Image (tube, rainbow, N blue to C red):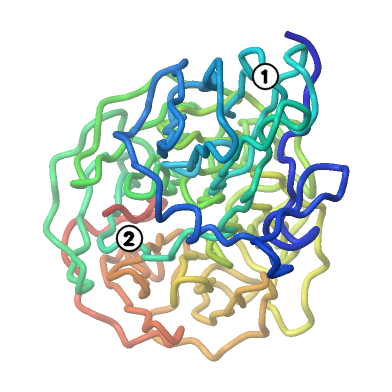
């Protein structure tokens, strides 16, 4: 077949539910003059088991949750249909933007287009209902709408890992759903410092990059039970001091760093199955020793670092499809510094805290709104330090831990779901710096 009918035939916000293609037709209920609602259609549908295959044949009257986590799915419509036959398809894993569904018309028309066309749908969270009208129009979408945001739950547990005591280490420390740090877990993978970490796949995590004395790009996946896996071979430019955060609800990104010679600005995307992608050309000021966190439920922000000439306070936003934005000038009242920590809190906001500025180890913090706007300095609480790490815990709270002040430390500071940092909590585990932190569930 040839020809494509759009990637999404009804873009959300372009009109009422039920708007059909480019012809502007709207299916209305009998004489009521209003769109047919999703709930009206769904009531008479027989939902089937989750479909994960690369091909399937649909049967009228059925609804199909389509999971495209591993592959695209081509759906063949029935070879014959009667007026009023209805089918429904739903994005089971919010993954159609990564792996789309393709609809094979199988000899009948689809929005008046014949079988030389196919239809593709590639929007995360989409639910699609189609009804057969007649031989002229054929199948017509009667509901074609997406849920923009998946419900925010936030991960309940966290993990600190790797770093240096003066010698590189790979030990980890789990953080419970109530913010309690556990004793050391024997390290797995290459011992190294200046690592970064982020979440992926909704409930898992990944540590990546760093230096053993030589820069590396190896990564280590973390299961949703907090178990760190052995090294995965490096992909992308080996470097130390990048930052990482999640985006899109279930994917991650590593950006910036130092490759042993200059500062760099490339990024590497992490899929929702933990696969690191090759280098993407850098955007913004090349620097290392910065931090990153999530905001708005599905976006990210990078801030701080050292650009080779001094401390930095510019920010770079990351869209919900993993695109890094150009530099946003530092907000007046935000202290330029390197090696802070950052994490999310309150489900959709973020916080940067601590670091090293012109006066030495620092303790101020800066809140990030759910629109990605960084606020001015808040007076510091707890031990001033830098090269520390941070992670979410309990779904909507955060924790800063470890780092270097007047020496290595393991103290932690809890962050409430309103973004308030607490006083020092006595350290548990190996005191160290230049480690990474992230959450899992």
Which image quarter holds the C terminus?
Answer: bottom left
Q: Residue at x 32, y 39 (%)?
A: 168
Q: Quadrant of the N terminus?
A: top right
Indicate left or right for 174 with 291 as reference.
left
Count of residue discs = 2
Q: Which mark is residue 108?
A: 1
Which marked residue is nearer to the observer: mark 2 or mark 1?
1
Residue lying at 53% horizontally and 68% vertically, measured from the top left: 355
Residue 155 position, x and y percent, is 32, 60
Q: Measuring 41% from the left and 48% from the top, which residue is drawn there? A: 199
Quarter of the image where one finds residue 400: bottom left
**Image quarter of residue 107:** top right
Query: Which residue is drawn at the image coordinates 42% and 51% (left, top)?
Result: 434
How many other residues sit within 10 Å of disc 1, few (<14), some (14-19) or many (≥20)?
A: many
Q: Is 302 located above or below residue 80 in the figure?
A: below
* Image: 397 above or below 128: below
Disc 1, SS: loop
Q: Is residue 74 visible?
A: no
Identify the residue under disc 2. 155
In percent of width and height, residue 356 lies at 56, 68
- Between residues 47 and 390, which one lies in front from this camera angle? 47
User: Which residue is most to the right?
Assistant: 23
Distance in Å between CA atoms under marks 2 and 1:
46 Å
Name the side, left or right, on which 285 lies relative to 70: right
Q: Secondary structure at mark 2?
A: loop
């Amino acid at each position: 077949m040839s020809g494509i009918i759009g990637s999404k035939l009804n873009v959300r916000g372009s009109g009422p539910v039920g708007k059909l293609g480019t012809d502007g037709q709207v299916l209305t209920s009998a004489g009521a003059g209003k769109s047919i609602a999703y709930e009206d259609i769904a009531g008479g549908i027989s939902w089937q088991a989750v479909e994960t295959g690369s091909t399937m044949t649909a049967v009228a009257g059925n609804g199909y949750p389509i999971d495209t986590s591993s592959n695209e799915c081509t759906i063949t419509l029935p070879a014959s249909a009667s007026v009023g036959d209805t089918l429904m398809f739903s994005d089971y894993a919010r993954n159609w933007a990564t792996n789309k569904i393709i609809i094979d018309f199988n000899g009948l028309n689809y929005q008046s287009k014949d079988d030389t066309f196919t239809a593709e749908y590639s929007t995360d969270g989409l639910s699609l209902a189609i009804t057969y009208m007649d031989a002229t129009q054929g199948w017509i979408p009667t509901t074609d709408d997406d849920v923009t945001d998946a419900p925010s739950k936030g991960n309940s547990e966290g993990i600190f890992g790797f770093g240096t005591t003066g010698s590189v280490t790979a030990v980890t420390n789990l953080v419970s759903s109530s913010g309690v740090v556990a004793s050391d877990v024997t390290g797995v993978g290459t011992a190294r410092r200046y690592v970064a970490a982020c979440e992926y796949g909704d409930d898992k995590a990944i540590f990546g990059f760093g230096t053993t004395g030589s820069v590396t790009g190896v990564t280590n996946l973390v299961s949703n039970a907090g178990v760190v896996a052995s090294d995965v071979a490096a992909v992308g430019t080996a470097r130390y001091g990048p930052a990482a955060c999640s985006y899109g609800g279930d994917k991650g990104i590593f950006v910036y760093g130092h490759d042993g010679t200059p500062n760099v600005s490339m990024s590497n995307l992490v899929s929702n199955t933990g696969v690191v992608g090759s280098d993407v050309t850098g955007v913004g000021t090349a620097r290392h020793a910065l931090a990153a966190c999530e905001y708005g439920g599905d976006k990210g922000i990078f801030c701080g670092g050292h650009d080779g000439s001094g401390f930095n306070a510019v920010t770079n936003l990351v869209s919900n499809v993993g695109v890094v934005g150009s530099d946003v000038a530092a907000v007046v009242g935000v202290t330029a510094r390197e090696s802070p920590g950052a994490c999310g809190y309150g489900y959709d906001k973020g916080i940067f805290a601590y670091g090293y500025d012109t006066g030495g180890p620092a303790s101020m913090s800066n809140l990030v709104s759910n629109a990605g706007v960084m606020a001015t300095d808040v007076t510091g609480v707890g031990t001033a330090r830098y090269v520390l790490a941070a992670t979410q815990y309990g779904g909507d709270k955060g924790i800063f831990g470890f780092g270097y002040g007047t020496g290595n430390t393991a103290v932690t500071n809890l962050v409430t779901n309103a973004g308030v940092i607490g006083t020092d909590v006595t350290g548990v585990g190996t005191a160290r710096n230049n480690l990474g932190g992230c959450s899992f569930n």
